[in-house]
Structures are given as C-alpha cells and as structure tokens.
Amino acid sequence: MFPRNKDKVVKPTIDEQGNTPLHTAAWEGNLEVVKLLLKHGADVHAENFERKTPLHFAAWEGGLKVVKLLLKHRADVHAKDFERKLLCILLLGKVI
C-alpha cells in the first residue's frame, strides 16, 4: 500500500476521490490505524479532491479520540473544504 524509503511514506495510495488511507481511517474512527499511519509519515494535512483533510473526516464521523490525535499532530483546525465549511465549526459540534 505504501512505497517505503527508510520507514517513511513516500507517496500514499489514493482512491477515486483523492482520499488517502489516513482519510479512510479517520472516517472510520480507527484510532489504531490512524496512529500507525501517522507513525509512518502519513500527511495530516493531505487534502482530497474536495479539499477535505483527515480532520474533516474525523470531525464528521471518526470520533473524538481520532480528532484529538490528529490535533496533537498539528492538523489545521482552520482548513476549509470547497464548500468553504470551516473545520473548527465541525469540531465544535463534536466537542459540545
């Protein structure tokens, strides 16, 4: 799935929407896979074709633990997708 160079991700596989494995793991709320991907260099700022990041996906469906982990890895809470939805508003809904 990941070509490697000294245990770092070189270029992740993406799907037809431009989602990386980190997007998918974040959407599914799979904390252990998110941890593993981040450990091996997955890009926390990766955007799909709609400019959604893994943090967008975690905020919608992935759960608070995944959100917190992505934030710990400096995911951008001010990221906007093509619909100009502010990620921080999505996150607020998860926290309250």
Image (cartoon, grey):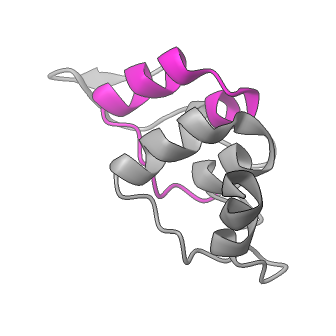
**Residue at the bottom extreme, as displayed:** 84
Q: Residue 22: percent from the left, percent from the top?
A: 56, 35
Q: Is residue 44 above or below residue 11?
A: below
Is 85 inside the magenta-drawn segment? no
Residue range (magenta): 23-47
Q: Is residue 5 left or right of residue 32?
A: left
- Seen at 70% across and 78% down, the residue is 86
Q: Residue 67: percent from the left, percent from the top?
A: 56, 45
Which picture quadrant has residue 96? bottom right
Does the image show residue 23?
no
Number of numbered discs present?
0
**Residue at the right extreme, as displayed:** 83
Is 26 inside the magenta-drawn segment? yes
Which picture quadrant has residue 41? top left
- Seen at 60% across and 30% down, the residue is 21
Q: Is residue 10 above or below residue 1?
A: below
Q: Residue 70: percent from the left, percent from the top?
A: 46, 46
Q: Residue 27: percent from the left, percent from the top?
A: 73, 36
Q: Observer-nearest residue: 18 or 77?
A: 77
**Residue at the left extreme, as displayed:** 6
- Seen at 60% across and 48% down, the residue is 54
Q: Observer-nearest residue: 79 or 5?
A: 79
Q: Is residue 89 above or below residue 55?
A: below
Dominant SS of magenta comes to helix
Q: Is residue 59 above or below residue 4?
A: below
- Seen at 72% across and 73% down, the residue is 89
